Image (tube, helix red, strand yellow):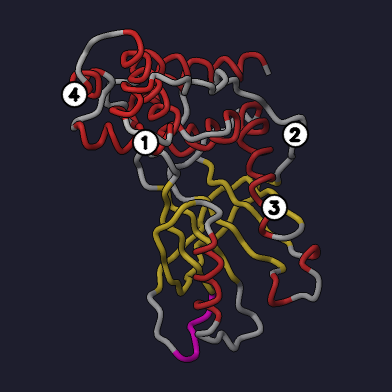
Amino acid sequence: MEDNLNCIYKVINFIEKNYDQQISVKDLEEVSNYSYRNIQRIFKYSCGETIGAFQQRLKVENAYKRILYTQESLTSIGIEVGFSTIASFSKAFKQHFGISPKEAKLSKQQLLCEPDLIPVTSDILLEPEIIYLKPTQVYYQSIQTYYNNEEIELLWDSFMHNEFLSSDAEYFGVIADEPLIKTEINCRYDACSTTQAQNKKLPSKPILGGKYARFTHSGTYETIDDTYTKIYSRWIFNSGLEFSHTPIIEKYERYADDINNQEEQLTYILLPLK
């Protein structure tokens, strides 16, 4: 796993050297040799924070060091560490430290207590099935949200109230990342059914189609992040596979409304491959 961790360290070192610059998706892909979708997730699950959050933290921490050890103005410091305006600098600083840059300059209290970022890998190696799937027409509703946000649960509550009467209906979640490096991993999430709703005309589109690595998550959806952690902080390093730019699909094989015990839930995580 040493070579795999070195990949993450390369990304960490690149961000540390360029934290005050605009870091593009292309930059990160070239440094890591992974697509932006995968390096976002690898970084998050290996390091415990997103790429954007790490860069933002470096900006405000380096700003605070300048506040402590230089006579520069707050405006100059904010610009030097990569903020475009004093307002955005002040907002980010206060969000991170709980006090404004001006208050920090006056008090100079000890604010820097974060440990160095050290990536880790999972002890558990999952083995997926490699499968080929045909395109499937689905009917869907979408939201813009963060991974594992309760808004996804609310979307499904609303979605299922549309009533899908066919006993053959299958249900999917489509996770389409925004191509941006943010402090949170923002995405468009689609709740999908293979049959049209009874009481509302939903838009339709094809999903799936192609080669996928299929992982199995057993138990409640609340713990699915643990399975993603095992995928992106261990399996993906050793797979030797090339990943497609198309979205990740979740297939809800046994879901909460369909069974009596949440522990019996079964979700397939489908990673697209080239």
Task: Name the element at disc 2.
Answer: loop
Q: CB under 8 Å between callouts 1 and 3?
A: no
- Which mark is in front, 4 or 3? 4
Crowding near pointer 4: few (<14 within 10 Å), some, many (20+)?
some
Question: Between residues 49 and 200, which one lies in front from this camera angle?
Answer: 49
Determine which residue is flagged by label 1.
Answer: 94
Residue type at mark 2 is Leu
CA separation in Å, label 1 and label 4: 15 Å
Report the residue at 62% width, 27% height from top.
Answer: 237
Front of the two marks 1 and 3: 1
Determine whether label 4 and label 2 are within 8 Å by CB.
no
Check residue 41 for magenta coloring.
Answer: no
Magenta-drawn stretch, dominant element (helix, strand or loop): loop
Q: Earlier in the sequence, mark 4 or mark 2?
A: 4
Q: Which residues are magenta?
A: 194-199
Compare residues 158 and 94 and report the one nearer the observer.
94
Q: Kindly identify which residue carries mark 4.
A: 75
Q: Which mark is residue 125?
A: 2
Q: Position of residue 82 (x, y in %)?
A: 26, 24
Whole-Å distance between the Cαs marked 2 and 1? 40 Å
Q: Residue at x 54, y 72 (%)?
A: 156
Q: Is residue 174 left or right of residue 257?
A: left
**Location of mark 3 (residue):** 223
The answer to which of marks 4 and 3 sits earlier in the sequence is 4
* Contact flag, marks 4 and 3 (Cβ < 8 Å): no
Q: Position of residue 217 (x, y in %)?
A: 72, 53
